[in-house]
Every structure is written in C-alpha cells, then in structure tokens.
Amino acid sequence: MIDEQVLDRTLHAALRAGGDFAEVFAEDRRASSARLDDGKVEELTSGRDRGAGIRVVRGETTGFAHTADLSEAGLQEAADAAAAAARGGEGTTNVVGLEHQAVTPPHEVLVLPESVEKARKVQMLARADDAARAEGDAIRQVSASYADSRRRILVANSDGLLAEDDQVRTRFFVQTVAVADTGMQTGMEAPGRTVGFELFDEVDPEEVARTSAKRALTMLRARPAPTGKLPVVLKKGAGGVLFHEACGHGLEADLVAKDASVFRGRAGEQVASPLVTLVDDGTLAREWGAYAIDDEGAPARNNVLIHDGVLTDYMWDLIRARKEGREQSGNGRRETYQHLPMVRMTNTYLLEGEDDPEEIVRQTPYGIYCAQLGGGQVNTATGDFVFGMTEAYLIENGEITEPVRAANLIGNGPETLRHVDAIGNDFGTWPGTCGKFGQGVPVSAGQPTLRVSELTIGGTAGE
Amino acid sequence: MSDAPSGELLDLGQRVAGAARAGEEVEAYVVRSRETEVRVFDGDVESLSMAGVEGVGVRVISDHRQGFAWAGSLETAVVDETLDEARDNAAFGEPDEWNGLPSPSDFEMVTPAPLDVWRESLLAVPPDDKVTLAIELERATRAADPRVRGVESAGYGDTAVEAAVASSLGVAATSRRTMCSCSSFSIAGEADETQTGYGFSVGRAFDDLDPADAARTAAERAVRLLGATKPRTQRLPVVLDPLVTRSLLAILGSALGGESMLKNRSMFVGRDGEQVAAPRVTLRDDPTLPEALGAASHDAEGVPTRPVDLIAGGVLFGFLHNTYTGRRSGAATTGSAVRGGFKSTPGVGARALYLEPGPLGPEEVLASVPAALYVQSVSGLHSGTNPVSGDFSVGAEGLMVRDGALAEPVREVTIASTLQRILLDVGEIGADLTWLPGGGAGLTLLVTEMTMSGE
C-alpha cells in the first residue's frame, strides 16, 4: 500500500521533535451493499475509503492526525500535525529499521467479494423475500440486505514492526414485519462471517428469511412479559452479547486503568460461578471478530479472561501493555484510519459445560427462555446492564410454553456471573457491532445454553 | 483548506452533475469537515487529534432505477470513478416510479431560512486553549464534590462542516456549520459502591461553552445516586429528565418519518387525524430555528427546510418526508432528507424536534405529583423500544419523588409502558426547553403512569 522507504521517512518525521513511539496505520477499504425492501431491490451501493492515521506518543500524551492522501507529502503533513499535537515529555526514541512480520490468518478466504458479479449478490435478496412471504399472509414487510467489505491494513511503527492484513467480511440480513389484530411485530436474523461470498455455502438466504419471519409470527402470539426477578435460560448463542457487554467491557485494560471497571484489582479472585470460563479469541476461524493482526500490528490471540470463575487477565492494547511492561493481547482495534485504537474485544465466549440443554429447561419450574437478545448497554463502572429480549418464552413446569412480548433484561455483570448455575454442552455465536467511545467494530459473542438463577425482567404484565 | 463558503465544493458537485447523460438524473453530495478532539486523564492530555475528512456521495437515477456510490476523497480521478460506479449500480436496482431527484420547481414557494450557524472564531482558537479547557473541566469535576473519586473521561471536541448538494435538475445548495462541546463522566462513591454522572456543554463558538456547569452537573448526577437501592415493583407517575425526554422524542420522530410510514414500520400508520396524544402535546420539527443545534437552511437533497407540525393538540398531523417518500405517499417533501454523511443515500429524519413547552418549571413539575419516579437516565432504549408495536421497556436510574421533591435514589429498575400510552399519559410538560446535541430539544416531562420493575 505504501513503499517501505516512505514509511521509514514518515516515522522519522513523526519523531523529529522527540517522542517515545510513532506509528503509521494505513487502510484501504472497499464495501458494497444491496438492499431489498417492499419487494424491490432499492439500490446497490459501493464505496471506497483510503487513508492513513499517524500517532506520536510522548510521555502520557498521544498526538494523532490522519489523511486521505497517501502520497509521501500527504503522510509527511499528517506526521508533522501528529508530532505537534503530542506535547507530553521529551522522549528520544529512534526509529528501528522496519522488518516485515509474517502473519497467520485465522482461516482462508475463498471468494473475494469483488470477484462476484453484482447480479449474484442482488439475487440473494429476491430469494429471501419470497421465502419470508411464503411463511404466511401475516408477513407484511420484508427487508433484506447484503453487505460485504474488504479492508486491507498496514501497520508500521518505530519499534520496527511492519505488518499487513486483509480482512474480508460478508453479512446477510433479513427483517420482517408481521401484522395481526394483536398488533405488529418484527423479526430479525443476520448471520455474518469474516469470509467472502462463500458465506452462502453455509448460510441459505431462504433459511435466514424463514427464521426471521417465524420470529415475527411467533411474537404476534406473545403475551406481555412478566415483571420482576426470575430464572432465565439463555439459548446457545442468544446470550453471548450479555457476557460481552456485562463482563467483557469491564475486562478491557483501558477502562480498568481509569477506575471505570467493577473488575479493577480483582485478578486472581473468584468473580464468577466456578462453571464460568470466559475467553476472548481473535483467532476463532471465520467468526465476525476474527483477524490475523489487530490494528496495532499485534497478532490475534486466544486469551482466557476468566477460568473456572477466577479472573485471570484483562485485554490489552499497545499503550496499556507498554505502560505495564507486558505483551499486547491482540485487542488494539479501531473503526477506521480516522480513529485512535483502543482496547476492544474480538470473539468473546463462554466455554461449554456438561449439562444437557434440554435438561436445563426441565430443571426450571418457572422462568424465561430467551432465544434472541437485541442490543444492550452496560455501565462498566457499576456493572449494571440492560438488554432487550427479541424472542423469549415462558418456562412453566420445566417446559417452554408461550412466547412473551419484547421486554428488557436488567441486572449487574458480576452478580450475573455468580448466578450462572447451569451450563450446557452446546454452543452458538452471534455477530454484531460493538460500540465504544463512538467507534464501532465487528465482534462476535457466544455461549452454550445456560441458566442465570435470577435476572430482573422489565415486562408490562403488571405486578 | 479554504474557508470560502463551500463554493469549491459546489463547483465540484456541479461538475459531477453536469456529466449526466441523456435520460439520467445525477446528484452529488460533497462534504468537507475539520475536527479537533482532546481527551484528558489525570490532569494530563491523553490524546489530541486533528483531522480533516472529505468525501462525495453520488446518486444516479435512470429509467427509475437508482444507484449510489461514495468515496472518501475529492481527487478528480476518484470522483469520476465514483460517478461511473453509481451509474453501473443503477442498472441493478429495480425500477420504482417514485425514484427521482427534487427539482427546484418542487420548492419554489419555500424561502430558505437565513441561518447563520458558522462561527469563524472557532477555527482560530489555538489547540492549547482547547487542551486547557479540557484539563480544567476534569479538575473542576473532581473538585465539585468530595465524593467524586475519579473522572472516567473528560474532553473537548469541535467540528466545522461544509457541504454542497448539486444535481442535474438544477438544485444547488451549500451549507456550513460549526459546533463545539465539552463533556465529563464522573465516578463517585467508596470502593464497594460506584455511581457515574454525565455533564456537558455545547455551542457553536468556543465562548458558548460553560465547562464549570458541565463539571457541576457531572458531579451532581453521580453523587445524588449514591446509596441507590432497588425499589419494589409498582405502577406510578414518572418524571423524565430533559435528556431522557429527548431520547424518547427521537424514537417518536423516527416513527413519524415517511420511510417508517410507507414501509408499515410505524405505530402511527393510518392514524392521521386521530387523537394519538394528550391534548396538551404539540410535537414539531423546526430546523429553521437558529438555536437548534441541528438547524439547517437546506436538507440533504438541497431542499429548503421549514417547520413541520407532527402532532398538534394531541392530533396526528403529518409525517416527515424526503422527495421519495413525499411523492410516493402523495404528499410532498417537507425538506426532511437527512444523511449519515457522504456514505449514505438520503433518508428521512428530524433535525430539530421538540415538544412545545408548558407553563411549569422543572421544580413545579415535581411539585405537581406527591409520589413519582424521577428518571435521570435510561439504558437499552433502542433494544427496549419497538417503534412498530410501541412496546417500551428500558433500564432506568434516578430518584424517587416524595412530597413533590427529589428523595432517595434508585437503581437497576426498568420502566415499561407502550409508546401509545406514554403519549396519551403525558401530564405536565416542563417550561425548561433545552436544545441538545444530536438535533432535538429536551424538557422535563411528567408521564402519569408507568410500570416500574424492581424487587
């Protein structure tokens, strides 16, 4: 993307006025998407973005500037601006000669999106539309979209690191609206993987559409959710996002350092039920949050965060790891070259246990079976979280009975970890976009079917 | 980069639009922005970012088929390639008789509001002054109350955006605006208890900012939650903080957009002329108000903006439209096209949505109810509300209201109702209209009954 000698000269320029560290992050991103709504392919969109972000660290301060101009002059200008913005201590680091690092991709990408004809991408949408509508007359609206992106990145820094990665992602999304005299309900299904068009070798657009439609139709029969504290069984894959939000964020070293985490100073302590082992694994092949290197050039790793309930480690980016004099964990990510990196999750999941998922339900006299969670939010400083359930059922006498309407789950991260009292031997993941300080990055979250002995349900069924 | 009022951007847009072939409609949306962001931690600058972003989004419509392409660059070769790509993409869209760009004759009756929301002075503020403000904001947050034990994040940010829209049908509009803000997140409490509070200040020029007020608010909002407990589940009146009201209005605004209506994704579909809210409720989007932070003389298709009444006297009055949704629903554009930047086609949205304020100040609203829940902030708003069914269930923290005044804090509760009922249950509307970042305005709002789930 950029000549090695130009990178070297840019790094020298960035450190001309002193500094402890300098880095060039260059990115070339191409994306295409198509959307069908109301039975019609609305439009095909394609876009490209290319540029570089340069940071200079001096003492406690990071100076940052970015440019869409990848010529040597453009990079020099950004380097000068970043150097001027870094105004911490003195710093007299020299630039170490760049050495190209070999990277190990978590898996192979088979069919690059740009090699696929636009017509084939569009075709997937019509198939989904037909399949969703075939589920019943109550399905009134179908919205389907296809999106792919290819992101090539290059990281070069004053430590001599030079590494590149090529990240390809493809996602398919179907939302349906069902209408009956009980009202309108929506259903959503959106599989995505860090692969090219071969996504459709394993994801059938018709099946995605049917799942989405069934969800909306089910919710039409739903009655108001109960209110108050109840046991909640989370279906495999459905609840990963809860552990991502309520526990994962609190294990990010930057938040820990700022006293904004309930897990601060608790390494080595029992913070969860002994059934819980929580992992963040950027190497998990094909998953939505997988990559070869993070956006600071560090290789992705499989990091155990909580082992048998004991907090083992946090997740680290370059700045925090340097400060602590330890290795990076491959969790330094940024949305685009226009952003500074920070500690982010990749694929975060709870490991399987030994229980039969069906038995977990049978052993629950009364509670909620949650088959899909929507978005959520957590206050990492307090651990308090809220999640919307978008597909949930009552459990009565050990059996899944009626669907309940959308309601929030509310609780506290550390308490929830302690209240996990059964873990199944199955496993599922869910792709999503994680937001932190205004930056969104692709992640996945996963978990086996499991039960939390009590969570608060914010339903509308009265007292 | 020049500070000439977007003339260069308009020239570029017109060059693209001028390349339209026979039977084609071409529109270029060209943006350039400059941004500064300062983050401080522990009395030191953590990061200082300075950046310029520019890009173009091109729409091509031919035979009623629409194609779109964007690029994060204004280099001639890249812009030309973007037009070609948009043209190619148009071949894959299905024909839709309502696809089309606005023509100047669609809005010749509307005079653009003479807005001046650009402050040249902001561009001249030295970075050191911005850093000083952010450091002082963090210091003041810590100093505001002994129970504040830290500041999770404090910072300053500003942006100056220039945009131009040009089309082959003769639309040619430019706009530019500046905005700056500072904000602080305080952490309060002893080791086993933590509460956080957010404070901010926003304006168009540097001197508009009041960091002392942001620091005070951040500290107060955290400290007053200390000792929060989980109350018992009950139905009760709920008083919403202006920030919470604004978030609720944003959801209503989206359900009142022409796209949601046409696609049957709104609980307001087919309810025109019906009493959908308490008679005291008037909900309006007015981007021509200079005090609104989302003020704009033209929308994202270059159509002049105007005040739009959505609910008047509790009756559903109208929807927001861009050119497409206006034509297709037999109405007309209301100048409500919005874009999330140059990377997206125009959608529909409110820029300056507000509830017409009532007579009572915030204390008087509290005094009007003997017992209630005062909601300081909500979480899970997007997952917890369904603009189609109207289901509403969100996490909340705040304080109980007893004998008409704020009393003990509560945490880890949810409040639930439906959007339909919330609108009909609007009791008092505060007089404290406050324009907020993100477009709309908030005020203190009393909802006469909701379900609060706790123990």
Image (cartoon, rainbow, N blue to C red):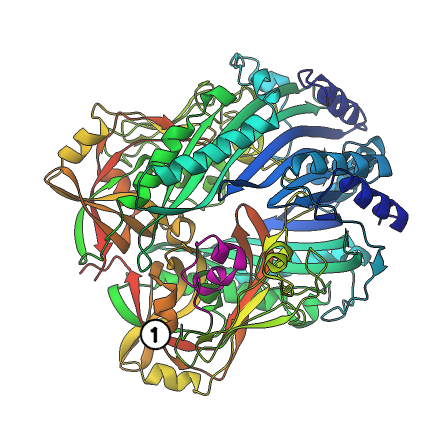
Residue at left offset 84%, top offset 34%: A73
Residue at left offset 75%, top offset 68%: A105
Point out the image quarter for the N terminus of chain B: top right
- Could you tell me which secondary element the residue under label 1 belongs to? loop
Residue A155 against residue B145 in the figure, above or below = below
Quadrant in the rendering for residue B39: top right
Horizontal placement of A67 versus A325: left or right?
right
Horizontal placement of B370 versus A290: left or right?
left
Point out the image quarter for the C terminus of chain B: bottom left
Residue B382 in picture, x, y percent from top left: 42, 49
Nearer-the-camera pick, A240 or A8: A8
Residue A15 against residue B119 in the figure, above or below = below
Horizontal placement of B389 versus B119: left or right?
left
Residue B14 against residue A415 in the figure, above or below = above
Residue A227 in picture, x, y percent from top left: 24, 62
What's drawn in magenta, residue-wise? A246-267
Residue A209 in picture, x, y percent from top left: 56, 63
Residue B321 in picture, x, y percent from top left: 50, 31
Report the residue marked by disc 1.
A419
Name the amino acid, label 1: His
Horizontal placement of B421 versus A196: left or right?
left
Looking at the rendered structure, the number of numbered marks drawn on it comes to 1
Magenta stretch holds residue B418: no
